[in-house]
Amino acid sequence: MRPRFLPAFLLSISLFSACAFSDDQPKHPAMSQQTRMDLIRAFSAELVYARTTFPIGKKGLMLKDGKITPNGKDLDQLLAMWGPAVKPGEQMMITDIRVKNDRIHFDVNGGSIKKKKWYQHIQLGVGNNETMETPEDPKVNPRGSSVDLVFDRYIPEMNPQQFKDMLRPVFDFDAKSRVEAYLETVPPKVKAAIQNHDVLVGMNREMVTYSLGRPPKKIREKDGDVDYEEWIYGDPPKDVHFVRLVGDEVVRVEVMKVNGEKVVRTEKEVDLANDTSLAKSKENPELRPTSIPTLRRPGEDANRNPRSDDGPNPNGPAITPDPGGPGQPHYLTFR
């Protein structure tokens, strides 16, 4: 290389190295120790509302780049096996915050692991060298769950509002009531119907309850091979609503108005199949534990139980009221 081109060559190399070095530098500084302590103090024991379903079990949720995992069929399987710890719109408490290298771990309602009592840590001495420990309870906390807020490589510096915005897919810090929090988790069409106290074909049980409240009357019937429930709201001379549900879905809405007009809707008005956070997937309805707890003896037929809903009653048609406590809905079960 000629000497006169050497300065220009060295200058271009230095500029390229500087650009490459600047690209490797983090765009945001890492979170300081003071900010970590401030966030833990500010949000520990905070009451929030859930914007998604938290499953029971050691495996909680993971939130990264605004996306929640597990989701879809994986989440449905966890819910079928263990059930939900918290559902959308329900209030919960952040009971513990742990800051790690690339994530922030949150325990809600006591966390997913059942904590040991103080007396479970006591050791009793027997003889000279023998000790006896109280057995550990391996069960998970049925009321608690967890979520991990995950970052790339490190946790960046942030203020409290940025912290809330990142957690918005799972936590609602601003809702004033359970209904307000729940309405933010449903599609706009469903939200408008609930606010107008209306029911749409395709809604699930929870949506109907938020719209019209708990049904004063429930009737269980059978149409051919299909079992369904009829939820009845109102009494004459007011409008009477009959909401028919098959499984968890509204399939028919009938309104008997005061003037004698009868309105019946059976065509699906809202489709929740693509929103797994609001409705369970119907593709795998039998996802459940392989061994379901039961009080029946081995070989005992479920159909022999006159109060069982698993099969027909061999004693013939009967109407059995389901006793409920004060303020609880009463069922009329037709067999």
Image (cartoon, rainbow, N blue to C red):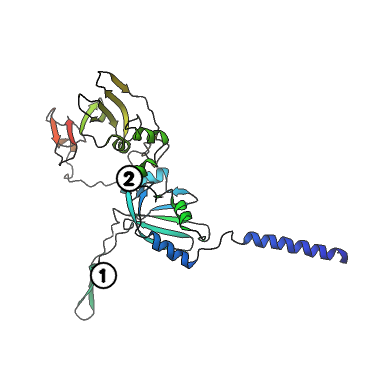
- Mark 2, mark 1: which one is toward the viewer? 2
Residue 68 at what x, y percent from top left? 44, 48
Marked residue nearer the N-terminal end (2 or 1): 1
Residue that mark 2 sits on: 178
Q: Residue at x 38, y 34 (%)?
A: 192
Q: Residue at x 77, y 61 (%)?
A: 12
Pointer 2 with pointer 1, Cβ within 8 A: no
Q: For marks 2 and 1, give the CA distance.
A: 38 Å
Question: How would you rate the neighbour count of disc 1 (Cα within 10 Å): few for under 14, some for 14-19, many for 20 or more?
Answer: few
Q: How many marks?
A: 2
Q: Residue at x 31, y 49 (%)?
A: 82
Whether residue 174 can be seen here:
yes
Q: Amino acid at mark 1?
A: His
Residue 160 at what x, y percent from top left? 45, 57
Q: Does 10 sit above or below residue 285?
A: below
Q: Quadrant of the N terminus?
A: bottom right
For residue 271, which quarter of the picture? top left
Query: Foreground: 49 or 15?
Result: 49
Q: Does 303 sit above or below residue 125?
A: above
Left or right placement of residue 248 versus residue 33 in this view: left
Label 1: element kind: helix
Residue that mark 1 sits on: 121
Query: Foreground: 9 or 292?
Result: 9
Whether residue 306 can be seen here:
no
Q: Amino acid at mark 2?
A: Arg
Residue 164 at what x, y percent from top left? 44, 53
Label 2: element kind: helix
Question: How would you rate the neighbour count of disc 2 (Cα within 10 Å): few for under 14, some for 14-19, many for 20 or more?
Answer: some
Q: Residue at x 50, y 66 (%)?
A: 32
